[in-house]
Image (cartoon, rainbow, N blue to C red):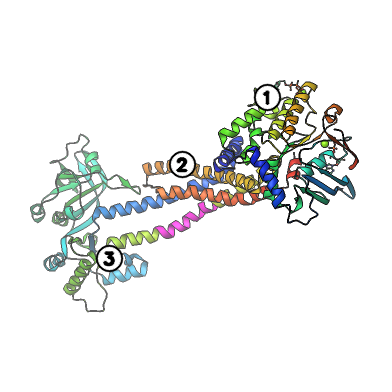
Amino acid sequence: MYDTKSDQMYRFMENEESEGQPRSNQAPRTLISMENIWKTYQMGVEQLHALRDVSFQVEKGEYLAIIGPSGSGKSTLMNLIGCLDSPSKGNYWINGNLVSDMTDDELARIRNKEIGFVFQTFNLLARATALHNVELPLIYAGMRAAERHEKAMQALESVELGDRVGHKPNELSGGQRQRVAIARALVNHPSILLADEPTGALDTKTSYEIMELFEKLHQEGNTIILVTHEHDIAERAHRIITIRDGKIEKDEKTK
Amino acid sequence: MDYTETLRLAISAIWAHKLRSFLTLLGMIIGMAAFMLVLSLLQGFKVYVDEKIAGIGSNSFSIQRFSFEDFKDTDSINAAQRLKKELTFDELDYIREHAKLIDKIGAKAGNTSRDVRVGSETLKDVGISGVEPVIGEIDNIDIDYGRYFTVTENNNSMRVAFIGSDVAKNLFPNGDVLGNEIYISGIPYRIIGVRVAKGTVFGQPQDNFVQLPIKTFGANFGGLRFSRSPYFAATSKKEVKMDDAVEEVRTLLRIKRKIPPGEKDTFGIVTPDAISGLIGSFTNTFGTVILFVPGIALFVGAIVIMNIMLVAVTERTKEIGIRKSLGARQADILRQFLFEAATLSAIGGATGLLLAFLLGYIVSKIAIPTVIPWWAAVISISVSAGVGILAGLFPAWKAAQLDPIEALRAE
Ligand SMILES: Nc1ncnc2c1ncn2[C@@H]1O[C@H](COP(=O)(O)OP(=O)(O)OP(=O)(O)O)[C@@H](O)[C@H]1O
Ligand SMILES: Nc1ncnc2c1ncn2[C@@H]1O[C@H](COP(=O)(O)OP(=O)(O)OP(=O)(O)O)[C@@H](O)[C@H]1O
Ligand SMILES: [Mg+2]
Ligand SMILES: [Mg+2]
């Protein structure tokens, strides 16, 4: 069965208390906690450090923007936060649980129920329609066909794609693909929204409409982390982290 | 993810590559079709034999000069020829008189091949045999027109004939058969009955024969000796076990022939059990050998499926990454690819089965009866799905193990 929002929150909070405790007292009680994270790629003989000794914490309910020049490691960091990648060195706790200790099924559950991820490159299933793409997270959540169909339609309508549900990604414009990716990230009503340049392909007006959707989710108590190059978008956040050459250069509260 | 969803996914993935799926399955289809066809031939043969035995009556057996074992090899044939003696009417009368467990017993003789003529029409190579009237009951002969022989006709060596439907059709195209005469070796015989058509079995026409009363046959075809020596067909009484009746006849014949205890029979007795046992052992050995070849085709088909599943996993690495990033568990991915392999393979199996049905239908029209037993159909689909699961296991496991971020980076 599909968890309602309150169930999800409740379970997530319960998790924090029951499973967070037995891990030594050093386990942080914040939602996201990164400690001396390194991500290193071995390119032939050379080592490429995409992230160097990154540490920071994110509380539940924060609204955080990550900015920085191209190639500075933003997407690398987002993949780590989203439990898709693992660090070369350092510890990452989500909700008090060390991610490297979690089983594959636990990680899959978190990706499915807690996290909504808008990828910089969209990552839509090329063979599937917009509707089916948005339905995917609900399928893996075990929701019945009729119900998930309705939810996916709602999500697509909220990004103004109600008239493109039957299109495959290659039958959509760049901006429309991005909006499908956003609808897919929002459809499961995630408690953590990770958005990697979610408005990169959108015009200003559409961008603002999308941002309003994000902010509505935030007002409901969920956490938003987004990567952006656009200043006006970053300024809407309550905290901005600036990354340069894989290091945190600045971490400031703006609201 | 539930099973209907997984199945839907599998079918759409297979459908997305129709031609490739078909080519992949060709080996499987041919293997399965060959397998089922061979099986259906063997089964058809068995059913035919069983029917034949049931037609004769499961309580009937025959007493002959030779038994089955005598034809094992040339040595036993030679030995049997020295040892075994022709049966006589004296012996028949002796059994008839003394047996208590026998219901009916009668003599037959022949099959001699002769031309049969009516007017200017000649039918070549018709099987001619002689029978006692009681054979009509022992062999459960179905009469289409007319009647079977009477005792008087036999006792007086009357020139009457009971014929097969092919002889009737070929010599009397206008259908007026009864009472007309046929000529065999220049002697006329009056037709008194026609048997119901049996068609061909294993390419052998069953309706190309003429039966005469056994005395008539003996009188006109050179005496009931050598290849025309009589043999007996008998049925046991309903209330007794056939084995007991067989034993009784054996004992009586041994007494009549004065065979000392401990010495071998100088005659043979053939029971339905002996026939079906012999044929059963033949089809079993033959079947094992001949099913081995399509078995190999199935095995090769399985390898081809494994190969295409490996290709599919590589091709769809990105898709797997996307699914994992959205919450697919290893079990979901494993199941997705296993289902795909199983569905693919089951489609191959079902298509092969269909092909076998069609071929079997054509074969039974032309030559041999074929039967695809329902259990074989069920097994073939399950086996092919099972083969698919086995073949899909490794590729699916590989897919499930993929690292989400590595998979997402694939193009
Ligand atoms: N799989 C990889 N193998 C090797 N190097 C990589 C790999 N992924 C990323 N990098 C390198 O790591 C660095 C950080 O990449 P990342 O994608 O995080 O940048 P970014 O900050 O998101 O940039 P952009 O704003 O252009 O999206 C880059 O120099 C990139 O070349
Ligand atoms: N292959 C296709 N099949 C059906 N509809 C299509 C196809 N390609 C584009 N479209 C539709 O045509 C319209 C224009 O698409 P186009 O890609 O030209 O938009 P665009 O102006 O480049 O938008 P964007 O700024 O988002 O890139 C869109 O509504 C899109 O859904
Ligand atoms: Mg990036
Ligand atoms: Mg465009």
Is residue B86 shown to the viewer in this render? no
Specify the label residue B55 is tagged with: none
Q: Ligand 2 near label 2 (Cβ, under 8 Å)?
A: no
Residue in the image at 39% along x and 52% along y:
B43
Out of B389 and B175, give the one closest to the viewer: B389
Q: Are marks 2 and 1 on the same chain?
A: no
What's the CA distance linking mark 2 and mark 3? 45 Å
Name which residue type carries label 1: Leu
In the structure shown, which secondary structural element does the residue marked by tag 2 occupy? helix
Residue contact between numbered discs 2 and 3, judged by CB atoms under 8 Å: no
Name which residue type carries label 2: Leu
Out of A28 and B58, give the one closest to the viewer: A28
Q: Chain of mark 1?
A: A
Q: Nearer the viewer, mark 2 or mark 3?
A: 2
User: Could you tell which of marks 2 and 3 lies nearer the N-terminus?
Assistant: 3
Q: Is residue B16 left or right of residue A58?
A: left
What's the CA distance linking mark 2 and mark 1? 46 Å
